Amino acid sequence: MKASKMDFSLTEEQAALQETVRRFAQSELPEIARKVEQTDESPSLAVMHRFAELGLLGVNLPEEYGGGGMSHFEAVLVLEEVAKVSIGVAFPVFESCFGPALAIANFAPEAMRRKLLPKVCSGDAIVAVSMSEPGAGSALTDLTTRGRIEDGQVVINGQKRWCSGAGHSDAYVVYCRLSDAPGAKGIGAVLVEKGAEGFSFGKRERHMGFRGVHSADMFFDDVRVPEDNIIVPAGGFGKLMEAFDLERCGNTTMSIACAQSAFDYVLNYAQEREQFGKPIIDFQAVQVQIAEMKMKLDAARLLLYRAVVNAEAGLPSVGESSIAKCFANEMTREVTGKAMQLMGGYGYSREYPIEQKMRDSWGWGIAGGSIDIQKTNIASSLVGRRFNQRAR
């Protein structure tokens, strides 16, 4: 039986899409990115509408909801080119292609899809996911936020933490307990729109990186939403985590973008910067560092591409998405660190982009499930069962 050929090149259409987004990002976004970094504020509505005009929001959402109707792979290509300029500027693209919008597209009632997803794709709405709590981060099934169903409404009480987009986004996919069943069996998700009575935000967090990405505690005090706002009922935690496997691919893409942009900058720098009468690229020690950075980047990108291509029209596997995320999270810290070291004092200066790339790169190994949690996921996928972390 003849083996099929594996093709690692982009199609003509994919290459054209990548180049178009690259030209746009490199020409129109640097000044916007500088403003986001200086002010720590999210991109303006005008920027969102420009993204929508170019079809960069919801690239992999169905066309019937205003999306691009393309694959997860095309969404990866788009996101990387925007994120190479700025994580903060790219975050709305990330949320629309790899965030909670995909959970809504896959699992929400049809009325919710038709109401919300076109607004996401037009740049008129941002949806964030609200998962973690003060006592439930990696141990997500310990969450205590509860939604009780009462007279056709869901009444929500609890507190959420580390929600990227909190206070800025227009709607939130809130993980909460919708039944008394223990652990994962009682967990589902409900859509809560900003402005709902009893729904408030704490003081905005200020992070080392991720400037322009809002984060804050969220408080639910008898927040009432229609029962139709349930995206996934109690017992649907597994479905939610399937969608989150795709979010890991978005996280992976952002990690790669941080590293690739730092690498591109330092490769050019090494050819221009002279010491001892010659460009530093002529020193073997520098060549070794550059080669190692390139090897790690290519490996990370191939792991990402495997996860999204194997997913085809569905959602990636937990094993492949965890491998891609974990490797890219570690890789981006290493590559941006090497880039800073090669640039010396210039790398450490805020007048140059490397220090920002390094700050942003560290966040991705924390966001969306820590590096060590990914390794546990990988082991679980290999043996075909979950590990009980609570067992003594």
Image: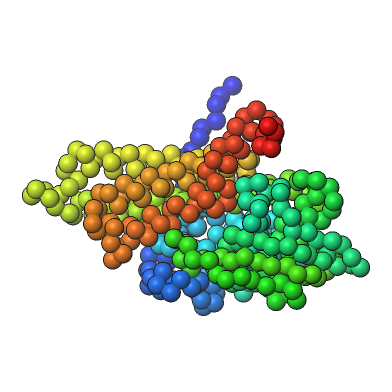
Residue 69: give x, y in percent of width and height: 63, 58
The structure residue drawn at horizontal position 62% and vertical position 65%, both measured from the top left corner, is: 217
Q: Quadrant of the C terminus?
A: top right
Residue 52: give x, y in percent of width and height: 56, 70
Kindly give the residue lying farthest to the front in the view shown. Answer: 392
Tell me if residue 260 can be seen. no
The structure residue drawn at horizontal position 38% and vertical position 54%, both measured from the top left corner, is: 358
Q: Quadrant of the N terminus?
A: top right
Q: To which quarter of the image does residue 258 belong?
A: bottom left
Q: To which quarter of the image does residue 189 belong?
A: bottom right
Viewer-side residue, 322 vs 133? 133
Instruction: State left or right for residue 372 relative to residue 380.
Output: left
The structure residue drawn at horizontal position 40% and vertical position 62%, both measured from the top left corner, is: 85
Kindly give the residue lying farthest to the top in the view shown. Answer: 1
Coloring applied to the structure: rainbow
Tell me if residue 366 can be seen. yes
Viewer-side residue, 224 vs 261? 224
Residue 183: give x, y in percent of width and height: 76, 45
The structure residue drawn at horizontal position 8% and vertical position 49%, both measured from the top left corner, is: 277
105 vs 378: above or below: below
Viewer-side residue, 63 vs 280? 280
Q: How many labels does the image show?
A: 0
Kindly give the residue lying farthest to the left in the view shown. Answer: 277
Instruction: State left or right for residue 367 relative to residue 228.
Output: left
Kindly give the residue lying farthest to the right in the view shown. Answer: 151
Residue 176: give x, y in percent of width and height: 75, 57
Instruction: State left or right for residue 239 relative to residue 23.
Output: right
